[in-house]
Amino acid sequence: MKMKKKEEFIYFNEEAYNVLQNYLLHQVDSIKNIFILVDDITSIHCLPILFRHISFLKKSNLIKIKSGEKEKNIYTCIQICKDLEKLKATRKSLIINLGGGVITDIGGFVASIFKRGIRFVNIPTTLLGMVDASIGYKTGVNLGSIKNEIGSFYIPKFLIIDPHFLKTLPNKEILSGMAEMFKHGLIADKNFWKEMNQIQIDIIQNENEWIHLIQKSILIKQKIVDQDPKEKGLRKILNFGHTIGHALESYFMSIKEMLHGVAVTMGMIYESWISFKINGLSFSDYIEIRSKLSTLYPIQNQISQLEIDKLLLIMEHDKKNEKNKIQFSLLKEIGKCSYNCQVPSSLIKESFLI
Ligand code: NAD
């Protein structure tokens, strides 16, 4: 299946590899000009799958980094640029990012700055990468504990979606990606939210059973991004759950592991409470969201007063803020979302205590 849109570049399954192979054979002058970026886990689980589909890629250049969010920084990018230089990359080179959101964010950013911009292809191998991180042209890295502080908007040549990669992905990572799928339903498509509610945990490793939901989720995000690529307005609805979610993720990053999906889920619950208080979300919708998400995810219920103050400080430095005001995207109802909402600090604090 190929998405019909202004710029057709998202391909699924078998067709995806055919299109990519054809492009590489005809539009890249030499195999030496192809660079595959992997981490130490995707090099084991995902690279052999890519090679099975396009065998000549075995002769391309491999750049491997350690896996994990800690690697998503400017120093890793500098090292990759040095590797590219050493391997004689040119302005005609092309990077294939094979991995989760960390790899597609880093690889996309490097592609956007190396020699003022070279081509890249995203092959996301996590659910979060497929339905979220690799879509929407945002690339970037963290600055210390500030998420995605350095980055660019940069368009990949292709986005290749192959759900077979999910077979080796741990359940907690699947759940992390599903959080963004739930979000897509909550902000833009009530029927999709309902469909997502039917997913049984025991089928999540069998991607054939819900590939159609992955495709729908991608379409929802892509449609929003196409209307507002640079996030001047509508695209901000994708930030639902993320104002608080990113603060939680930044704060807990240095203390213990908190998966992006869990942070965003907690953010969606707290921001649904705020939506109920000031944006017209009905109490029954709030309860439906809270009970669905809190049964699926390991939500940390107790956040101390000290932690709440620190979280607020982080939110005050959110790059999405305008005129020194923390900006929220809030639900009006399930399937409809507003953006540029200002929320008093007292209500943000209250949401953590409910
Ligand atoms: P990740 O890239 O760290 O992947 C999670 C783990 O799964 C890693 O250890 C990875 O090595 C491993 N892995 C990847 N594919 C695998 C496979 N097929 N089988 C087994 N293991 C596999 O994390 P993620 O959750 O994919 O992405 C999170 C990142 O995405 C965050 O940095 C977040 O900020 C970013 N993000 C970016 C955007 C954007 O618009 N650019 C949107 C959302 C999230």
Image: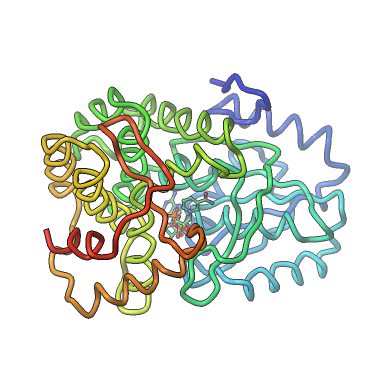
Tell me which colouring the rendered structure shows.
Answer: rainbow
Residue 330 in the image, given as x and y percentages of width and height: 33, 44
183 above or below 242?
A: above
354 above or below 17?
A: below
Residue 30 in the image, given as x and y percentages of width and height: 86, 46
244 above or below 135?
A: below
Residue in the image at 22% along x and 80% along y: 306
Residue in the image at 18% along x and 40% along y: 289
Residue 88 left/right relative to 294: right
Residue 252 in the image, given as x and y percentages of width and height: 32, 72
Q: Ligand 1: which quarter?
A: bottom left
Q: Where on the picture, by quarter, is residue 230?
A: top right
Residue 277 left/right relative to 181: left
Q: Name the residue nearer the viewer: 225 or 280.
A: 280
Q: Name the residue nearer the viewer: 329 or 92.
A: 329
Residue 189 left/right relative to 7: left
* Quadrant of the image containing the C terminus: bottom left
Residue 135 in the image, given as x and y percentages of width and height: 54, 41
Q: How many discs mark residues in the rendered view?
A: 0
Residue in the image at 55% along x and 36% along y: 225
Residue in the image at 45% along x and 39% along y: 131
Q: Where on the picture, by quarter, is residue 279?
A: top left
Residue 250 left/right relative to 224: left
47 above or below 253?
A: above
Q: Name the residue nearer the viewer: 290 or 115.
A: 290
